[in-house]
Amino acid sequence: MKKIQNYVTGQWIEGKGEGTPMYDAITGEVVALSDTQGLDFAEILHYGRTKGGEVLRKMTFQERGNMLKSLALYLTKRKEGFYELSYRTGATRVDSWIDIEGGFGNLFANASLRKLFPNQSYHVEGEPIDLSRGGRFMAHHIMVPKRGVAVHINAFNFPVWGMLEKCASNWMAGVPAVVKPATNGSFLTEAVVREIIASRILPEGALQLITGSARTILDTVESQDVVTFTGSAATGRLLKSHKRIIEESVPFNMEADSLNASVLGEDAVPGTPEFDLFIKEVRNEMTVKCGQKCTAIRRIIVPQDLVEDVQIALGKALDKVTIGDPRLKEVRMGALVSKDQVTEVRNRVQELAKTASIVYGDLDKIETIGADAKKGAFLSPILLREDHPFKNLSVHETEAFGPVSTIMPYKDIEEAVTLAQMGKGSLVSSIATYDDKIAKEYVINAASHHGRILVINREMAKESTGHGSPLPNLVHGGPGRAGGGEEMGGLRGIKHYLQRTAIQGSPTTLTEITGIYQAKAKYIEADQHPFKYHWEDIQPGMSLKTHKRTLTDTDIINFSNLTWDHFYAHTDITSLDGSIFEKRTAHGYFIIAAAAGLFVYPNKGPVAANYGLEDCRFLRPLYHNDTIYVRLTCKQKVDRDVASAEHPSGIVKWFVEVFDAEDELVAVATILTMVQKKQEVFVE
Ligand code: NDP
């Protein structure tokens, strides 16, 4: 029997043991053996930290992002092979799409985030902080890649997405990964990793794979490592309290059992679009991936007088779910991952059924098409009804990780919130309502217990991604029972793998460290007008002091007439009593326009366009006869790679300071210009 291999320390290695069989969820045949015996986890982690980490850490965010994009494109071209293998985990094409292309989608989405980072290997976070009266002592936060390895211990339900949603973040941060999927289904993870390694897109050591059991993997984790875990709460607790995790203060992100709730709003009675949308959502969440989704709806909270309607409508919807060989087009639901999982789910349903009643489905009977129900890991959808959810707490505590959900009644929205909170923390909740007052009441009160909340109504339905889909730019994770962790969420997911450090010093020192010109830092007087330089020759701090201009009464009147901005302070000097203005006042927009008139270099040159304006502030009114001059200083350079492939250019942010005749700062702004490059720097 074929053994799948592990990719560690730069090679594909077979375990030295007998191997653990992994079964085809549909036929029950052995697909391959998983074997990790003989692997030296200490050596594997060390290899990641040194070999992969050293290269990744030096890459810029732009380079890492482009690497992820290339990888996503490469894998997308080879997706059909993964779909074929995925059927053997019991997944339908739609289920596999979430896992496979959802995983690639995470690579794409994280790749796009490169634009939000500076063009260097570390991040500068937030705003500068002034720590002194004189402005010569300040601070900024920087975030550098951790010098460890990300160890991902994953669950069986998403062999591809589970790996990539996590790795996308750590690779963007410049940290290598060691991935340990659950033994079940790890043959699919192995197939994807084989392609990733063959592509040579990632630097060696950025990804290692342990395809099976790794009980001692945490024994040598170090303080710079990060561990993530997805799976059962029992294992999660065990690993979170591992001696080494505690001794070395290793960040441990846990995602475990989550009894996600969906609420039917009191307004969403039968006949409304929201009622139908609710039924569809619950049906999907029960049956997609056979209910083996950490975000699936486990608790269906409905107004007490609509319980009967919901039960009937859901029954009808579930009747339409054909079960069997997931390769068949007409099949809507495949199998659970293994027969052991079927036993596990059955046991949990029996636990729930001690107080709740099964109102749809049969634990022992199932009709399948194209597959032998006895050989495969099949289970009918099971709908339960718990009429006393405040008294019988099992429904808020027992996660049956399969096509199982329970209806329960509520009296008013306050009760619905309380019931949702009785899950003690979930990844996601949803509410179907077309009354935004109800939506607000639910969201504000339930949010403390949920990582994400979806409001379902007729306006968003067509474009909704659904209750169960974690999205790369949104936080995924939940408090309490859901594990207390947070992952993804765009930039925040990446920051999980970066060390945040407050840097204190002079503005000039911090300009050098951050790569961003800090107010009051020393200027670097430019030898020629800064607009005459190409992108490559511009550096933060490069500065120009302009000539002066006196603003006249006529300037202000002309500007009013030109723009039709006739605000009284510019046009009516009889109305100034009691206002903050002493004399005829120049328009703020005029100050900015006049500043541009002072700093712009008129000749055709490398500055290709004016791109926009940020952080504009007028610090005091300017009157006729006031004189101004400008300091134009390069604040920051933001690279553009693919977007500027045709006319290679980058964005230069210029800090514009407007001073009066007494050298007092009267206005500031940041202007953005597109500046041509001498040559194309980025080659895809
Ligand atoms: P487990 O908690 O048993 O396993 C999760 C991962 O942890 C697997 O990769 C497993 O590896 C690994 N693991 C288990 N024990 C150890 C250990 N001592 N040291 C290191 N790694 C370990 O969960 P399962 O995936 O088997 O699923 C069991 C139940 O968990 C489900 O029935 C469901 O209730 C729940 N679950 C919840 C999820 C959620 O997010 N809400 C997601 C998935 C599962 P190996 O497979 O090799 O043992």
Image (cartoon, rainbow, N blue to C red):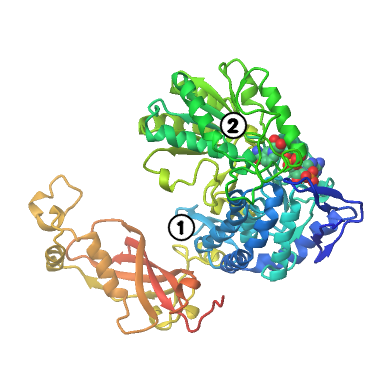
The type of residue carrying mark 1 is Gly
- Please, is residue 599 above or below residue 82 in the view? below
Secondary element at tag 2: loop
Verify CB contact (< 8 Å) between mark 2 and mark 1: no
Q: Is residue 641 left or right of residue 663?
A: right
- Decide which of 553, 650 is in the foreground and name it: 650
Picture mark count: 2
Judged by depth in the image, the label closer to the viewer, 2 or 1, is 2
If you read the primary sequence from the N terminus, does the residue marked by circle 2 or circle 1 appear first? 1
Q: Residue at x 40, y 25 (%)?
A: 266
Mark 2 surroundings: few (<14), some (14-19) or many (≥20) residues within 10 A = many
- The spot of residue 182 in percent (x, y) is 75, 47
Which numbered marker is on residue 405? Answer: none
Q: Quadrant of residue 287?
A: top right
Q: Disc 2 to disc 1, how far (Cα)?
A: 56 Å
Please, which residue is most extreme toward the left here?
A: 574
Read off the residue under disc 2: 298
* Quadrant of the image containing the C terminus: bottom right
Residue 255 visible in this rendered orientation of the protein: no
Quadrant position of the N terminus in the picture: bottom right
Give me the residue at 58% from left, 20% from top: 386
**Residue 515 in the image, given as x and y percentages of width and height:** 53, 67
> Callout 1: 10 Å neighbours few (<14), some, many (20+)?
some
Rendering coords of residue 299 (x, y %): 57, 29
Which amino acid, mark 2?
Arg
- Front residue of 62/433: it is 433
Which numbered marker is on residue 135?
1
